[in-house]
Structure formats: structure tokens, C-alpha cells
Image (cartoon, helix red, strand yellow):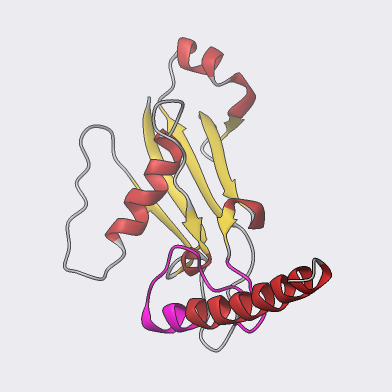
Amino acid sequence: MYLASLTITNFRHFTKTTVSFQPGLNVIVGPNNIRKSAVVDGLHALLAGADDPYPRFTSDDVHLPNGGTATGEITFTFVFKDLDTDDEADFLHALRESPAGEIEAVMGVTYGEPDILWLRFPGCRAGTAAGSLRAEALTDILAAADVINSYLHSELSILLSQFGR
């Protein structure tokens, strides 16, 4: 059995793309900024388990179309081919017949909004990523801290006045 393809949907710079693999060793090589890390992170979503938790994505990882808004689920779909009878038994729930008439296993991992980290505070742009510390996100976080600080200060003043302090 081998991983024949990985389809990445709504993830970083990918609206939807499929990466094909061959049996044996596959190497991903290329210059910077061609989305190699996005492919590796998609593979990591498949390989995660009890000892290695699933990757956590932020709103920055949701695909942002030109002039649009980052919304929707991130999905990774994995297709395995050349299954032997033991593999077929292990992946019985994921089996389907390919267009070529071969048995393959198809599995997917979906990250919906509850799985994606979002930071929302009054006075901040909605959807600022919690894990991002780029300049604009840091500005939003500092603005949120000021709003929270003012709110807490006013609430503390009310409480202290109720106790005569």
C-alpha cells in the first residue's frame, strides 16, 4: 500500500490542489515559496495520533482568495492504492472502487471553525489569528488589551465603590 495522492482544499495559498505520489520514496524539492510546507503540513494531519497531536491551524491558514475573506473548512483527502487483503480489512470503512476499477482507500481530515484558532476581542478586526504575531495582528492584540484593561478598571472601580473603598 502507498499514498497515491493528497488533495488539499482551502489551505493557505491552495484553493484546491492534488499532489500525486509514486510507490517508494518521494522527495519534495523546490525553491522557496512554492508551498512545500503546506504539503508537508497536510501529511502531518494524516500521521498525527496519540503521541503526536494533530496540528493546530490558525485563521491565517485558511485560504484567502484575492479580494475575499478567509472562510470555510480546511480539508486534506488521502488516497491509498495497491492495498493487499490485510490493508483492505484494516481500511474496510474507507474502501471504494477507483475509476480504473481498482480498490483504493480514501480518508480525509477536516478542520472546521472550532478546530481553527481565532482571536476576537471588542475593538479588534474579527478573525485575527491567535498564533500570529505579525505587525497588524500585534497592533490588534494591543488594542484588545487596552479595551480589556479599560473594562476591568471600570468594573474594579464599581466593585470597590460598592464596598466603600
**Does 122 appear above or below 162?**
below
Across and down, in percent, residue 30 comes to: 17, 63
124 relative to 8 in the view: left or right: right
In the rendered image, residue 147 lying in the magenta stretch gets the answer: no
Residue 153 seen by the camera: yes
The residue lying furthest to the front in this view is 164
Please identify the quarter of the rendering in which residue 14 is found: bottom left
Tell me where residue 165 sits by quadrant: bottom right
Question: From which residue to which does the magenta span run?
Answer: 119-139
- The image shows residue 65, relative to residue 91, as above or below, that is below
Q: Is residue 126 in the magenta section?
A: yes
Q: Residue at x 44, y 67 (%)?
A: 12
Q: Judge whether 29 appears above or below 108 on screen.
A: below
- Total labels: the figure holds 0
Percent position of residue 91, x then y: 55, 21
Question: Which residue corresponds to the image point at 83% horizontal and 69% vertical from the top-left?
Answer: 162
Magenta span main SS: loop
Q: Quadrant of residue 3?
A: top left
Q: Residue at x 39, y 32 (%)?
A: 52
Left or right placement of residue 35 versus residue 47 in this view: left
Residues 109 and 112: in front is 112
Find the residue positioned furthest to the right. Answer: 162
The image shows residue 43 at horizontal and vertical percentages of: 38, 43
Q: Position of residue 82 (x, y in %)?
A: 40, 25
Q: Which quadrant of the figure contains the N terminus? A: top left
Q: Can residue 98 be spotted in the picture? A: no
In the depicted view, which residue is nearer to us: 109 or 141? 141
Q: Nearer the viewer, residue 161 or 94?
A: 161
